[in-house]
Image (cartoon, rainbow, N blue to C red):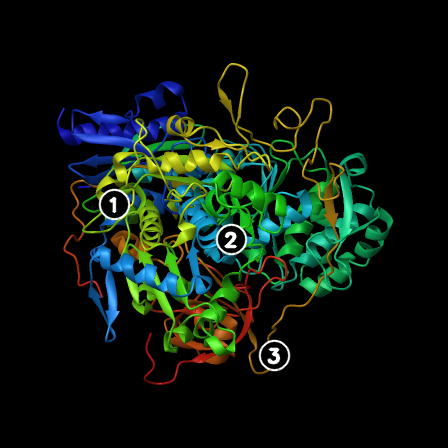
Amino acid sequence: MDRRDFLRQMAMTAASAAVTGSVEAQRSVVPLGSSPRDGVTWNKAPCRFCGTGCHVQVGVRQGRIVAIQADPQAEVNKGHLCVKGYHVGLAPYGPDRLTRPLLRRNGELVPISWDQALDVIAERIQRNPAGFALYGSGQWTIPEGYAGTKFVKAGLGTNNIEANARLCMASAVTGFLATYGVDEPASCFDDLDRCDVMICWGNNPAEMHPVLFSRFLDRRSRGERTTLVDIGTRRTRTTGFADHYLEFKPHTDTAIALGVMALLVREGTYDRRFVENHCAFRAPQADSPTLQGEAIDFEAWKARVAEYTPERVQEISGVPAREIRRLAELFGNRDLRIASFWCMGMNQHTAGTAINSLVHGVHLLSGHWGREGDGPSSLTGQPSACGTVREVGTLVHLLPGGTLVAKPEHRAAAERRWNVPAGRISDRIGPHTVEMFRRFCLPADQGGDIDTIWVQVTNPGQTMPNATEYFDRSRELEGKFLIVSDVYPTLTTRAADLVLPSAMWVEKNGMFGNSERRTQQWFKMIEPPGEARDDCWQILAVARRLFDRGFETMRDADGKFLFHMEDERGREVPTWDFRRYYDINVDERLFEEYRGFSTTKHKNLAPYGEYVRARGLRWPVVETDDGTWRETRYRFVEGEDPFVPQGDGFQFYHSTSEDDRAQIWFHPYTPPPEVPDEEYPFWLCTGRVLEHWHSGTMTMRIPPLRRAMPQAYVELHRDDARRLGIAQGDLVRIESRRGHLDITAWIDGRGQPPRGSVFVPFFDERLRINLVTLHEYDPFSKQPDYKKCAVRIRRAPRGAST
Amino acid sequence: MPITGAVVLLPATPQERQAVVTRLSRDSRVLLGPEMGGRLAIVVEAPSTHEGQELLKSVQAMTGVGAVLPVFHDFSDEHPEVEPRSEE
């Protein structure tokens, strides 16, 4: 058999294993380790892209990735990949990787040494520690995020650390907190294999989470009867598979959820027993509402939701009353299993906390909760938005493990664990993302107290809303300094004062946490190019540089370096020296330290070694009597969740009402902050596409993906186009009160917005739609609303170009 | 020449299912594998990753096809651009 025959056989074995699902077939798929036949070494890793957390096997030969295989042992993707995962092996090989530190001098970025770069950062921090902020992302690995949090909160004594997950899932967090008193989904992806009805609340999983969507579709191919309900503001690929499509006016999803609850109560089809035993009722306070709200009784709650009759909901949302009734009938049928999923549509919303809470409420009220296939789940867009940002706590108000800066006992516990003096962790919550960049864009004498931001693994120059005011403006101000660690040039690196080249994905050790509480691990497989180095090392090296320069708070209570690490023989390892960084497994040391935080909020993690063996484990993970470690599929459910006592059935043990009950909320429908009017008569919605991931930094450098979707576009309705004299492919000017963009028209394209709406994806840095979007945010989650603002459109003026 | 292994989620109706299988069996770039429970294993050998992807997209677009899910991708014979451009 020659090499090609061998590869052909491998490909067929992998496909056959995925088709048959048989253990024998899966075993015959190439095992991890070296294959003597073709010199390829295979190892496991989660995919670099979205929050699904598919596992791939990465084939490396002579220091280069040469093949990617879906991992047949991975429970998430069950041997399948999407088009992005299929190409993930090409992500490190774009032609313009950043390979040297670059410092802006006389307007130009010029190469400098790492030693010089570390000095520049240390000087900026020493000059004004309180004016320094670290801004990362849900692509930080867990150890990277943990190092960043410890560096800022224990080392600098501020809380100025945020992550771009604030822009994508903060409202999901506040929804979970308001409902259950603790973050992250109680259910998991297994629901897709078991539900009778899948409801998509404003998301498009056919493009954004294709592997998860295929788990549901696959059941139809096998002849199972399933129902898909798509609730959206434009027709998408998901709509094409839907049995029922409910098109609503932007922002009015809260009314739909309220309408369903009102009908469940009016018809008496809600689950009285579940509600009486396990739920309490809440509403926002009339004055100064908080995330905790105020307790109300069932009768008061019932009276408030009663006004959302199907007819009123139709008036608000545009969804026919009969469709609201049909949705309520589905929820009123407890013989069905109903799984709700959502993503940015519900989160990037000035009423994001409200709609998240209300959808949980629909499930709780109807008793569609806590059974396999029967519950609500939010999806994330980034590979470790959950594992790093939400669990490690890389946000201004959080400490690791879901503990809070605002709680003195949590600060004290963190100080003990980090062995820093009492009082080191500040009780002042720092500025959230939008506020952080607002202050960065203001002069110091006008409240602009953030003067240095260090950005890692994200691209705010492209993704901040209202980007002129919330990013670009800073570049015109004296005294502002932007540091950016990244793998490729981006709009953010191009605006930076200092650029640091980073290692990516399997060029370093790492751990991610996906949307179903699954913690995953991988080892470094290839070398990063040039002088590119791990983001985690960069944080440790800056901390050490400060330590060496006498910055006292980089010492612990014993005078040791805050990130002091020893080898097996008790000798300190100089991890800040990159030549020695891999002398020990820094990831393992940081993770084991972080793991100690995980028990406070029952997010228990297993030892690092368990994740080396597994394709991820869903927390809480607890040790059983036989010494093995057991993951949890369904939280708060007896028999599944180890913290629910026998006989209780369900127990919401972090209940905000402190009686083990989940909260069913009333939030009234409130209008959006900006609506179309005579001057700006269209809705603008922004989002993603199948081929590209977020700001396109990686996927636009993968030739097949770039060819498949080479540039952004505006989708508009054919009637609007005809009325405005716009033809397919014309250049269109989209203009809001904040900025404008000239972009090519796509009529009857992949997505089909209704009359009066347009859609633009945000992946294309050449076509920055965030010059146009709105910076208004949810009052609780502080997450901005990228999904709707008012714009006007017309053919672009002569001479305009994209 | 890149090699791709994939799974096709076949249409529910027998006629549509047969149409997909027939179309694939006539394509010299495609090797058919086992079919079970509405899922068909295939291996695609196309001159480039791009052409292979276009082929998978055309299958995806066939009536009734639920999805085409790649499972294996060997691109060791394909050399993406490797020369670095100027950095800034």
Q: Position of residue B70 (x, y in %)?
A: 34, 39
* Dot 2 crowding, Cα within 10 Å, few <14, some 14–19, many 20+: many
- Check the image and name the residue furthest to the right: A299
Residue drawn at point x = 48 percent, y = 48 percent: A389
Looking at the picture, does residue B34 appear above or below residue A266? above
Q: Earlier in the sequence, mark 1 or mark 3?
A: 1
Q: Are marks 1 and 3 in contact (CB under 8 Å)?
A: no
Disc 1 from disc 3: Cα separation: 59 Å
The answer, for residue A685, to whether it is visible in the render is no
Q: Quadrant of the C terminus of chain A?
A: bottom left
Q: Earlier in the sequence, mark 1 or mark 2?
A: 2
Depth check: give the residue in front, A47 or A478.
Answer: A478
Depth check: give the residue in front, A523 or A56.
Answer: A523
Looking at the picture, does residue B15 appear above or below residue A486? above
Which secondary structure lies at badge 2? loop
Q: Disc 3 marks which residue?
A: A677
For disc 2, the chain is A
Amino acid found under the numbered disc labelled 1: Asp
Q: Are marks 2 and 3 on the same chain?
A: yes
Disc marking residue A577: 1
Residue drawn at point x = 20 percent, y = 61 percent: A112
Of marks 1 and 3, the one in the foreground:
1
Amino acid found under the numbered disc labelled 2: Leu
Of marks 2 and 3, the one in the foreground:
2
Q: Position of residue A439 (x, y in %)?
A: 49, 70
Q: Disc 2 marks which residue?
A: A395
